[in-house]
Image (cartoon, grey):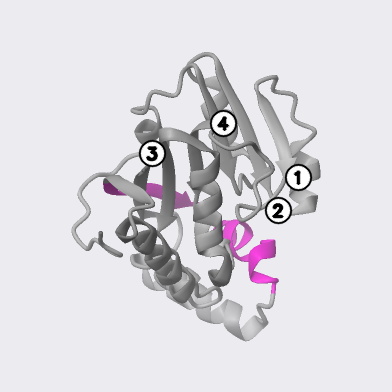
Amino acid sequence: MKLLEKNITQTINESYLIETLNLNNKKILELGCGNAAMTKMIAKNGFDRQIIACEVDEIQHKKNLKEEIENIEFILAQAQDIPLEDNSIDFVFMFKSFHHVPKNMMQKALSEIKRVLKPNAIAYISEPLFQGDQNELIRLFHDEEQERIDAFEAIKEAVEKEEFKLFQEVFFQSEITYDNFEDFENKMMNVTYNDNNIDESLRNKVKEKYESFGGGKLTFLKPFRVDILQKV
């Protein structure tokens, strides 16, 4: 297993990678679903997919409950305490959320994932890599390097202990475009996860870095690692 991959050649939308999996006629659990964008994509593709989507943020969870999609059930729950029966899930998904689990709870979360998965079932854990031009921008106000290292080490440890088999490790990059710095600011800086502790001096520093990449409308290649784990 590798934490990083410097020579990523595959540029795709992650939805294409997800749809290479056989998700039809399956019971699916998503942990840390956020605004449920990926949840809804999975639910609306294919057929006979039952999805349970968990989120820890109460405000976001209340927003998700307003969605009316018959094959999605939204639950307020965390990865380290999943309120589901043993051996009841065919696929578990985590999209850019595992590194948000507290370090001392990561192994507990992986144990919970293993518990709810059916024998030989699959966990798909997608994590952003701490590299690339966009990362150089974001790290100025929201540095997650250690959290991403901790997440990788926890997954690696679970594989080495043979709690999971590493079925496949995939590196890819996705395009993300911002119309201008203000668009970047609205989408990446004015969000709750960084606590909005951005003063004018830091804002100007980030803006200067954005302009150093050319300014105006910019497209970045955002790199990811996906660990596809099979329950042992």
Q: Position of residue 175 (x, y in %)?
A: 38, 47
In this figure, which residue is indicated by the disc labeled 4? 88
Please give the range of residues in magenta: 169-196
Q: Secondary structure at mark 2?
A: loop
Q: Mark 3 against mark 4, which lies toward the viewer?
A: 4
In this figure, which residue is indicated by the disc labeled 3? 13
Amino acid type assigned to the residue bearing label 2 in the image? Val
* Disc assigned to residue 56: 2
Q: Residues within 10 Å of mark 2 (few under 14, many from 20)?
A: some
* Disc assigned to residue 51: none
Q: Are marks 1 and 2 in contact (CB under 8 Å)?
A: yes
In the image, farthest residue toward the bottom: 201
Residue drawn at x 33%, y 65% is 132
In this figure, which residue is indicated by the disc labeled 1? 61
- The residue nearer to you, when weighing 13 against 109, is 109
**Label whose residue precedes the other's in the sequence (1 or 2):** 2
Q: Secondary structure at mark 4?
A: loop
Q: Are marks 4 and 1 in contact (CB under 8 Å)?
A: no
Q: Secondary structure at mark 3?
A: loop
Q: Mark 1 against mark 2, which lies toward the viewer?
A: 2
**Label whose residue precedes the other's in the sequence (3 or 1):** 3
Residue drawn at x 74%, y 48% is 60
Image quarter where the N terminus lies is bottom left
- The residue nearer to you, when weighing 113 against 226, is 113
Asked whether the viewer can see residue 43, the reply is: yes
- The residue nearer to you, when weighing 17 against 167, is 167
Horizontal side of 26 relative to 168 (left or right) equals right
Distance between the alpha carbons at the discs numbered 1 and 2? 7 Å
Image quarter where the C terminus lies is top left
Horizontal side of 215 relative to 100 (left or right) equals left
Q: Position of residue 138 (x, y in %)?
A: 49, 69
